[in-house]
Structure formats: structure tokens, C-alpha cells
Amino acid sequence: MNAVRKVARLMDAAKEELSMSRTKFRIAALLPVIAMLTSSPPVTAETYPARPISLIVPGPAGGTPDVVARLIGESLRGRLGQQIVVDNRAGANGFIGVQGAARAQPDGYTLLMGFAQTMALNPVTFKRIPYDPLRDFAPIARLVEFELVLAVPAALPVKSVADLVKWLKANKGKAAFGSFGAGSPSQFAGEMFARSAGSDAQHVAYKGSAPLVTDLVGGQVQYGFVVLQVAQQLARAGKVRLLAVTGSKRQAAAPDLPTMAEAGYGDVVATGWYGLYAPKGTPEPILKRLEQEVGVVLQNPDLQHKLSGQGVRPAFIGSAAFQSYAQSEIERWRAIVAKTGFTAQD
């Protein structure tokens, strides 16, 4: 009797195992079908974009970066067939906007317009930042570049860089220079000039170009490095005097202005730039499509004219070259910051 029961139990176990094996087989057979039904269609340059794209600008509405982003975004809309929605996220030295872009879904529908300050200077002027500009982003293209110009109030009795240096030495303890942001190219151009000129001028950081030029015109600061186009408008109105540009060569927009190197201060070279980035992991077809379209729109004469009105010029380089350029910019600014004796902020 016991033997019969034992055989029955073995038969039941065999049936159960057979049933489970059949179930596993059926599930395995269904897996490819389930995957096919639930997976998203492959992303291609032709199918992208299917909806509006958000472009994060880590600066306030109305500033030069905001206007540049809107101009380029409008031109891209005509190429991509979708609206580019500018998302201004100002504050905390650009941390808020850049970190938000780094954390976004890497699907091509959230992009970042990064600046020299946020992507090259922040890494060397802060001990810790909440993003890595090289590891957290896929560079798409450099968009524009701009030079700065050394400007003084029209009421200041100087007409050249040499005159300004003499005035600063004769007025030790009384001078200040302004920049359009703490840790900006404008600040470090001013710091390098003060160091080379033997000046003790104190730095005053403003939140953007508008308040800087207001105080420059009013004489609250005795000099500042500002965007060339903005300064030219003030110079034509007789409110400031322009002394030299920070580029490596004279600018077509101001051929009579010497470079800082020609004025005897070759270490004062400051070029700003804006670039287009996507979160790391964004599909390659999307990155290539965006790179291609940006290259096309920046060749448009109408857009070039509008950008010139904002004091910037198209300076397109593609993703591979931009990656190398961004890395070299970090190292270049690291060397400049070190020379000024600037202490990294917490």
C-alpha cells in the first residue's frame, strides 16, 4: 500500500513539473511579442522632434543670453517644425538651470544653453558644483562668441589704457571696477588688469550687464569689462569711453580700438561664448540632427545681423570640436583664476 502511495506522489510531482515547464515555455515564447508591443519606436532624425522642445537658459528673462536663445530658437523652429520654448532658470550662479538640465530625461526634448561661466568657470571658481559639465552633458555645438571691451565713464579724465593706469596709481584706495557677475569672464578680465597694472581697485559684482553699465555711466565704478556692442551704444551716446578690446585681434565692429595686448596687457584676454548641450544619454540621431540644423541656421544673414545687435557673433563648431574646446576652456580659465589669487568658493 505504501508503495502505491509513493508511486502516486511521484506521478503527481511529475505532472506538476511538466505543467510548470509548459508554462515557462509559453512565457518564454511570449516575451519577444511583449517586448515588441511595449517598446517605443526607434528614434530617428526624421521622426524627431514630435513635440515642442524646452531650452533651459540659466539666466533671467530679458538678458543677452535669453534674447540670443530666443533668436536661435525661432530660427530652429523653421527647420525642426516644432517650437523651441525658452525656460529661464536664473539664480545660484547658474547652478539651478544647469542642474535642472542635467537631471532631465535624455530624450532630446530638454536642452541647455550653457555659458563660459556655467560650463568653464564655475568648475574652477567653486569647490563643489552640483553638476559635471563634461560628464553630465552631450555637447551639440558652440553657438556664439563675444569679446569684452574695457570701458570707463565719460567723465573720467582718461583716453587710453595708459591714461587709466596712471589715474589708478594716483588714486589708490579710491577705485573700483565692476563686472556683470561674480566668477564671470568680466570679473577675471578686471582682476587680471588690476594685477598687471599694479592697481588696488576693488571688485563690484553685478547681476547682469544692465546694472553694471548703469553704475559705470554714473561713475560708481571707474572701469569695467563689458560686452562690446552694449558699450558701443553707450559710447555713441557720449556716456562712456572705450579703451581696448579683450580679444586676440582687433574687432571688425570696432577696428580703431586696440587690443589689450597692443596696449601692453597681453594677459588680459577674455572671450565669452554660449553653447548648446543635451543631457548625457540623449540618442545620437537626435544630437546629430540638432548639430546639423544649428550649423545651418547660424549661416543665415538675417540671424547673424540680429545676433550682432546683441553683441555676439556666430561661432559654430560641431560636437566633437566643441567637446575638446570646452575642456580646453576649463583649463585656460583655471590658469587665469590661479594667477589672480582667487580663492575657490564653497
Image (cartoon, helix red, strand yellow):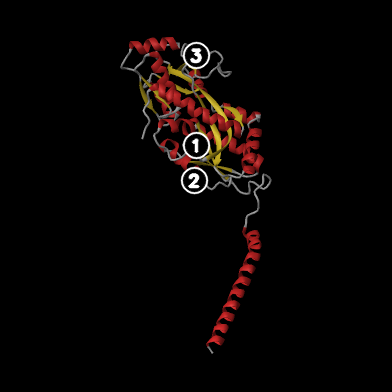
N-terminal of the pair, mark 3 or mark 2, is 2
In this view, the residue in front, 261 or 303, is 261
Q: Which quadrant is the C terminus positioned in?
A: top left
Please tell me whether mark 2 sits on a helix, a strand or a loop.
Answer: loop
Q: Which quadrant is the N terminus positioned in?
A: bottom right
| Vertical placement of residue 327 versus 198, above or below | below
N-terminal of the pair, mark 2 or mark 1, is 2
Q: Amino acid at mark 2?
A: Arg
Res 344 quadrant in image:
top left
Quote the CA–CA distance across marks 2 and 1.
12 Å
Residue hosting label 3: 261
Q: Which mark is residue 103?
A: 2
Please tell me whether mark 3 sits on a helix, a strand or a loop.
Answer: loop
In this view, the residue in front, 202 or 337, is 337
Q: Which mark is residue 133?
A: 1
Q: Is residue 80 left or right of residue 106?
A: right
Q: Is residue 213 visible?
A: no
